[in-house]
Amino acid sequence: AVAKQPIVEAKEKIVVEPKSPYEIERGKPMPSVNHAFVQKRLVVKLDIKYADKYEVLPELSINVIDRGRVPDIAICDLNIAFKVGEDTVKMDGTPLGVIEILSPEQILSELVEKLADYFQIGVKSYWLVIPDLRSIYVFDRPQNYEVFTWRDELTDPILDIQLNLQEIFK
């Protein structure tokens, strides 16, 4: 007869890291290296190409439905301005467009929830960037989007923006 071995269940120990001050303040996970590259390239390319039309601002705090949101990039009309001695922590008004970049530790549903909030306050265009897939989803309203990959020329007809994504995801 074969002796029966007792079944031992392995229990994984789940370690929850405390949130950093950045995550607490901004309400989102720490960005990664790829996130930083994509964010920088989007800000620079959009600012160079559309400086006569938009202010392209990273990490701008805005009021959204009784809570603050800090999109990775806000695309604003030119009436927002740098004002010496009149700085504020939160933007007055609503950006025309918002760009959110998925971080490795972020849950996609969080960004989809933010999308609905942004459209509810009057944002006209929302871009959801997924660096690992080298793609950008451009929404003109919740549930309606077009997908562009690293091989494409992104077109946003609402904001009248065209952008070569090979330059963003290189």
Image: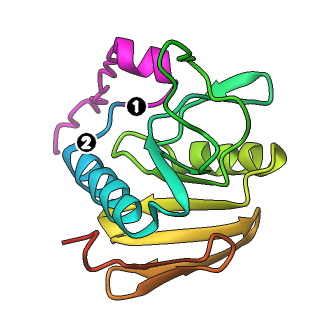
Q: Residue 97 location, x and y as percent?
A: 62, 56
- The picture quadrant where one finds residue 143 is bottom right
Assess whether residue 10 is covered by the magenta stretch. yes
Query: Could you say which is closer to the camera, residue 108 or residue 166?
Result: 166
- Residue 32's label in the rendered image is 2
Magenta-colored span: 1-29
Q: Residue drawn at (66%, 43%), measured in percent from left and top?
A: 114
Q: Is residue 21 magenta?
A: yes
Q: Are marks 2 and 1 in contact (CB under 8 Å)?
A: no
Amino acid tagged 2: Ser
Which quarter of the image is occupied by the N terminus?
Answer: top left
Label 1 element class: loop
Q: Secondary structure at mark 2?
A: loop
Work out whether residue 19 can be spotted. Answer: no
Vertical order, 8 against 19 (above or below): below
Residue occupying the point 63% across, 70% down: 159
Q: Residue at x 39, y 87 (%)?
A: 152
Q: Residues within 10 Å of mark 2 (few under 14, many from 20)?
A: few
Q: Residues within 10 Å of mark 1 (few under 14, many from 20)?
A: some
Give the residue type that dot 1 points to.
Pro
Viewed as shown, does residue 83 lie left or right of 116? left
Q: Residue at x 32, y 38 (%)?
A: 31
Q: In the shown orientation, is residue 161 left or right of residue 132?
A: right
Relative vertical location of residue 113 with respect to residue 7 in this rendering, above or below: below
Q: Which residue is mark 1?
A: 29
Looking at the image, can residue 148 be seen?
yes
Q: Position of residue 106 (x, y in %)?
A: 44, 41
Report the front residue among 103 and 37. Answer: 37
Quarter of the image for the C terminus: give it: bottom left
